């Protein structure tokens, strides 16, 4: 066990975690040069294209130190985006140490600080690494000051590297072996193994990534999942060395994979504790948390005959992604679809793109919403995320919505606009921390629903790309949320209904009405488009009628003939308006919902 090191790489998004992981794999000869490609641990096309890690991944590397000693390094690469912080949390539970990367040109950012606190929560040994020192804008002294002032770590321990060019990578490997502690645990104790991730193999079922904390696990062992309550028999265990390498057993301190005939990721719970059926452990590994869905949206196929394909596609994605939840939903305008729960907007975006790419589906996605808690007058308490199930306002006693504690790091000159942006998004309290020269942390408590649409984009714009944002849920607070319905020709369109704070109801309703007026083609009669709360109209646009020239056949003659024809047309239009139906094209829904919030 002295020669094992379990560590992960944590940092803000785009600070070079995956690139550093690539260099470590190459330095340990973990892959043949002909098989090497950038972002070795990112298995999805979307991850490579966008340069982000969505799914944490692991690799076991054999490293020979300069003194000739051989070590087994278990590296877990983690996502940097705030949406996937639950993946980071599980990865940290499986490690004793972490490399915390700081960008030499940008310094410490919000997610770096958030990940630092997570790592301290699990009592991990931290080794700072200053990356991107090859950039012209790199400032190592500034990065060291930030490590000291903002992270509270020893700046002289920080290893300056360039993950892109491979400069000083050997120093990182030496630092891992010397500074990070080996695992502890008793191989003879009752089995305790943490499931920190899983992926699906179509031939072998779910392959679990595990870290053995106590005891030993061998093939043919009967195992029990302590939170999920299911029992399985072990088919195979081994190391993940970019390909699966079977071993006879995994002992305390080791990280590897386990195959046990699990059919779907939803059959087990990621973060669960595995123990032996014959000699079970008394209690599970502490720190287990379920992934919480915070953003909800309905997904409909562009054409109704693709509903079956969408069902199969979501089933397949859920096999791989345990954080995705979905249930059947229907809309009068768009037919059958699914109401889905996501970890955040990036998660929604990734799922949408995977459905379109991997399964070639055209989709319409409703405006995202959060989960509101309602206290009704009859004493019942209900949680609602779908406007379709919103009760009559007269039945509601009070409404609460989820609040977050947002941490925004920004250069000093942008503090004013950042605080103004928070106020626009209904921030309830703001405090400032002066972290280092020219760097300020703004801490703000605000509703989660307010950061769903354009908050992050606006933040990046007003800080010229230097602002960074992280958040954590805190509590539910009282609010004044209303359901806004969009009426087309006095008929409600259920897909376009949304829940919003009363202050912002009119501006969003006006935006929806104007968009629809542009996209819906003109009919033979005038079409009113209205945004309403209950019986009150708060916004309106009108599509004027197409007017056929019924008098074109009258060449001269008495004016009364023309008047008679125009009167007949007027009566016909009135009748048509009464009985005619408006054809709303699919692209009208897409344009309104894509545009989000103004």
Image: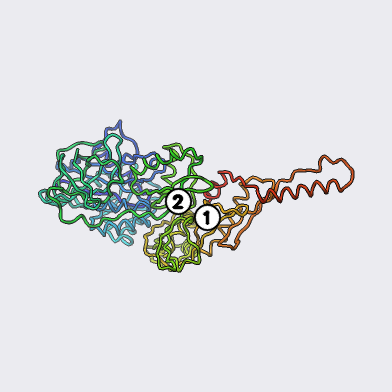
Residue drawn at (23%, 56%) of the image? 124
Indicate which disc, 2 or 1, sits on the residue closer to the N terminus. 2
- Give the residue pinned by disc 2: 297
Residue drawn at (44%, 42%) of the image? 353
In the picture shown, does residue 301 fall above or below 380?
above
- In-image side of 508 versus 100 (left or right): right
Q: Which mark is residue 497?
A: 1
- In-image side of 350 versus 159 (left or right): right
Residue 175 visible, this orientation: no
- In-image side of 141 versus 595 (left or right): left
Residue drawn at (81%, 41%) of the image? 552
Q: Mark 2 or mark 1, which is nearer to you? A: 1
> How far across and down, in percent of the image, does residue 596 sit?
52, 52
Q: Which class describes the residues within 10 Å of circle 2: few (<14), some (14-19), or many (20+)? A: some
The number of numbered badges drawn on the structure is 2
Question: Coloring scheme of the render?
Answer: rainbow
Question: The C terminus is located in which quarter?
Answer: bottom right
In the current view of this chain or complex, which residue is farthest to the left? 188
Helix, strand or loop status at disc 1: loop
> How far across and down, in percent of the image, does residue 211 sit?
21, 47
């Amino acid at each position: 066990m002295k020669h094992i090191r379990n560590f992960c790489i944590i940092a803000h998004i785009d600070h070079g975690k995956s690139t550093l992981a690539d260099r470590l794999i190459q330095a340990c000869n973990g892959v043949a040069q002909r098989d090497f490609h950038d972002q070795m641990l990112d298995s999805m096309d979307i991850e490579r294209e966008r340069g982000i890690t969505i799914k944490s991944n692991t690799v076991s590397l054999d490293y020979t130190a300069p003194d000739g000693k051989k070590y087994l390094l278990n590296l877990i690469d983690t996502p940097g985006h705030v949406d996937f912080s639950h993946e980071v949390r599980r990865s940290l539970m499986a490690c004793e140490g972490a490399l915390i990367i700081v960008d030499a040109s940008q310094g410490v950012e919000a997610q770096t600080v958030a990940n630092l606190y997570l790592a301290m929560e699990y009592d991990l040994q931290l080794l700072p690494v200053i990356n991107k020192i090859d950039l012209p804008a790199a400032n190592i002294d500034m990065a060291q000051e930030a490590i000291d002032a903002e992270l509270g770590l020893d700046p002289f321990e920080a290893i300056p590297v360039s993950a892109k060019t491979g400069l000083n990578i050997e120093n990182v490997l030496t630092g891992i072996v010397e500074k990070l502690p080996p695992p502890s645990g008793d191989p003879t104790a009752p089995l305790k193994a943490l499931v920190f991730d899983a992926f699906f193999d179509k031939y072998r079922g779910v392959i679990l990534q595990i870290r053995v904390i106590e005891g030993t696990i061998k093939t043919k062992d009967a195992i029990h999942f302590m939170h999920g309550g299911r029992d399985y028999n072990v088919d195979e265990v081994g190391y993940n060395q970019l390909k699966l390498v079977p071993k006879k057993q995994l002992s305390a301190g080791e990280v590897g994979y386990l195959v046990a005939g699990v059919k779907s990721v939803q059959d087990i719970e990621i973060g669960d504790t595995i123990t032996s059926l014959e000699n079970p452990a008394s209690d599970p590994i502490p720190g287990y948390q379920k992934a919480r869905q915070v953003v909800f949206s309905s997904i409909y196929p562009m054409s109704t005959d693709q509903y079956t394909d969408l069902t199969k596609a979501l089933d397949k994605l859920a096999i791989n992604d345990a954080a995705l939840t979905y249930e059947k939903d229907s809309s009068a305008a768009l037919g059958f679809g699914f109401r889905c729960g996501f970890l955040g907007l990036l998660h929604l975006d990734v799922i949408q793109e995977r459905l379109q790419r991997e399964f070639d589906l055209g989709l319409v996605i409703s405006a995202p919403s959060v989960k509101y808690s309602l206290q009704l007058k009859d004493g019942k308490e209900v949680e609602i995320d779908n406007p379709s199930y919103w009760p009559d306002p007269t039945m509601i006693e009070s409404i609460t919505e989820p609040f977050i504690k947002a941490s925004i790091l920004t250069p000093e000159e942008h503090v004013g606009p950042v605080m103004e942006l928070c106020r626009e998004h209904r921030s309830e309290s703001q405090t400032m921390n002066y972290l280092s020269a020219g760097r300020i942390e703004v801490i703000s408590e605000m509703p989660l629903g307010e950061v769903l649409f354009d908050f992050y984009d606006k933040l990046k714009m007003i800080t010229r790309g230097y602002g960074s944002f992280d958040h954590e849920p805190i509590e539910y607070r009282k609010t004044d949320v209303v359901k806004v319905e969009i009426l087309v020709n006095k008929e409600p369109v259920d897909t376009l209904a949304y829940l919003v704070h009363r202050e912002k109801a009119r501006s969003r309703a006006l935006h929806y009405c104007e968009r629809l007026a542009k996209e819906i083609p003109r009919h033979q009669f005038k079409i009113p488009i209205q945004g309403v709360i209950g019986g009150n109209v708060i916004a309106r646009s009108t599509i004027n009628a197409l007017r056929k020239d019924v008098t074109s056949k009258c060449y001269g003659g008495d004016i009364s003939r023309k008047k008679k024809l125009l009167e007949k047309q007027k009566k016909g239009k009135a009748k048509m308006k009464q009985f005619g139906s408006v054809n709303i094209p699919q692209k009208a829904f897409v344009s309104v919902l894509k545009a989000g919030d103004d």
